[in-house]
Amino acid sequence: MNDVTRLAAAAPSGRLGIVHLGLGAFHRAHQAVYLERYRQRSGDDTWGVSSANLRGGVALVDALRDAGHRYHVAEYADRDNVTLREIGVIEETHFTGQDKRTGRDGAVSWGRDLDALLARLVSPDTRLVTLTVTEKGYFLSPAEGSLLRDDPLIAHDIREPHTPRTAPGILVEALAHRREAGQPPFTVLSCDNMPDNGRRTRAAVIQLAACRDIELSEWIASAVAFPCSMVDRIVPAMTETDFARLAELGVEDPNAVVGEAFSQWVVEDDFPLGRPAWEAEGVEMVADVAPFETMKLRMLNGSHSLLAYLGALDDIETVFDAVSRDDLRGLLRRYMLEEAAPTLSMPAGTDLDAYADSLLARFANDSLRHRLQQIAMDGSQKLPQRWLHGALARLEAGAEVSCTVLGVAAWIRYTAGHDLHGNAYAVDDPLATTYKLLHEAHGEDIEALVPAFLELDAVFPPALAGDADFAAAVTAAYRNLTRRGLGEAIASLGRR
Ligand code: NAI
Ligand code: CS2
């Protein structure tokens, strides 16, 4: 028996059926709420969660431990209608990332709770592993989905597979232990905003396992279920205003989260070791998630990204502030109905006009302070599925994509790190250094800058990058936006 298997045998719980990777705001306000409601209603307490942060978030891991793993979620329909819940379904927290505080003389160390997390993953109690590690946590090229083998953390996990630092690395190591112990594998359920998120997670895990042991990778390919899911609930990062408002409601909880009242979870029903019977809580179990996922990514998230880049360039702070402007609200409606909706193949009866209206109403929720800078993060990871795949389909069909073109121009300008009024901000994206170098190299030479960005093949599908009309349109939109400002750039779309 090796160390991890011994630890797993020593740590049976009977209650922790789920391990979650990515203990952020969304996990606390979405999956955990469904599970809490399920537990309260059914009395079944075998689907408790052991939740881990792999990168950042050590303070939250420890604060939840200190609070006995109980915290509050406030669900706002609007400023006057809030539902407060106390959540206890997360029963254990771990941190396996780089911990600056634990090193000697400021040196950094890794993997504080890694053994305990691996033991939990190897335990026969664990039947399901869920993930919200953000799009970049899968270490896949956003454009074509291949594993980023040269990324330093993935290179580490290939070299040192027993002390993994990435989500795919941790899954591979845990699955290797389960295979050795003759135990059936857990199901892996990605809850990140990616197209085909189950298949992408599978691709990352199989490709990484193949770097270590081809038989392991074949076993994972044949034995592990990776259902896809579509998740939806707007859960902004907490602000001081949110904490102050909760205090007025009598909740003084540093681990509390605030979100909208709306919540949706559509899941492919493929759970060989079982799952909570969470249908009664509104989880939709379906055979194929893809149409719902594409609809949400292109209409909701695509709109969010449009607001984020255009709005941040004009120093607008939140989604609510942005959709309070007639021109931006009009642009969103046009983008959703004229550019996103026509690219979707939905089940009969889906009303995309009504969906667009419901999204605009959700964006106008005056109780959420959803900062545009938060949504603008990681654009390289988000643009392909939100805008670019749909735009390419439209261009191939001979249709126009002027809202997306303006969005791409705004994104390129956004990556310069200062808005149209000169206010500076940090660009938070795995490709931030590349953007900086491109802006330094090309400066105000728009004719060179735009094609240089479109050549980023990690982001732009080659067919789109090679479309001369698209490149010319983005160049013109960039010029318009930077010389005449946001209002004029939007107004000129109306003058087709
Ligand atoms: P957050 O900022 O509160 O938490 C981010 C989480 O991702 C943390 O647990 C962090 O440790 C982890 N993480 C970041 N980079 C990582 C990496 N390279 N490897 C491993 N873990 C990494 O963000 P939040 O709100 O929890 O959102 C996380 C993800 O959940 C989003 O990226 C999105 O895919 C999904 N989601 C979020 C929604 C929201 O409204 N907040 C709604 C729908 C989906
Ligand atoms: C947002 C999403 O941060 C972002 O990029 O577009 O997190 C969005 O709030 C959720 O997908 C809503 O379900």
Image (cartoon, rainbow, N blue to C red):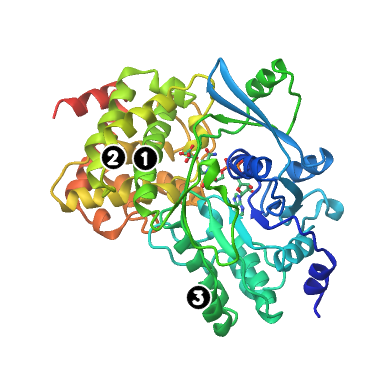
Q: How many marks?
A: 3
Q: Quadrant of the N terminus?
A: bottom right
Q: Looking at the picture, how far across and down is residue 50, in whole percent?
A: 72, 53
> How many angstroms separate mark 1 from mark 3 (CA)?
32 Å
Image position of 212 with respect to 147: above or below: below
For marks 2 and 1, the one nearer the N-term is: 1
Q: Is residue 422 visible?
A: no
Which secondary structure lies at badge 1? helix
Nearer to us: label 2 or label 1: 1
> How many angstroms separate mark 2 from mark 3 (CA)?
37 Å
For mark 3, what is the residue? 221
Find residue 114 and name its label: none
Q: Spot the residue most to the front.
A: 42
> How many angstroms separate mark 2 from mark 1 (CA)?
9 Å
For marks 1 and 3, the one nearer the N-term is: 3
Viewer-nearest residue: 151 or 237: 237
For mark 2, what is the residue? 404
For the point 83% across and 54% down, the residue is 103
Q: Is residue 98 visible?
A: yes
For the point 51% across and 62% down, the residue is 201
For marks 2 and 3, the one nearer the N-term is: 3
Viewer-nearest residue: 216 or 456: 216
Amino acid on which the number 1 mark rests in the picture: Gly
For the point 62% across and 44% down, the residue is 38
Q: Residues within 10 Å of mark 2 (few under 14, many from 20)?
A: many
Which secondary structure lies at badge 2? helix
User: Looking at the image, do the residues carrying marks 2 and 1 touch, with CB atoms under 8 Å apart?
Assistant: yes
Viewer-nearest residue: 354 or 138: 354
Amino acid on which the number 2 mark rests in the picture: Thr
Q: Residues within 10 Å of mark 3 (few under 14, many from 20)?
A: some
For mark 1, what is the residue? 302
Q: Looking at the picture, how far across and down is residue 336, in whole percent?
A: 29, 35
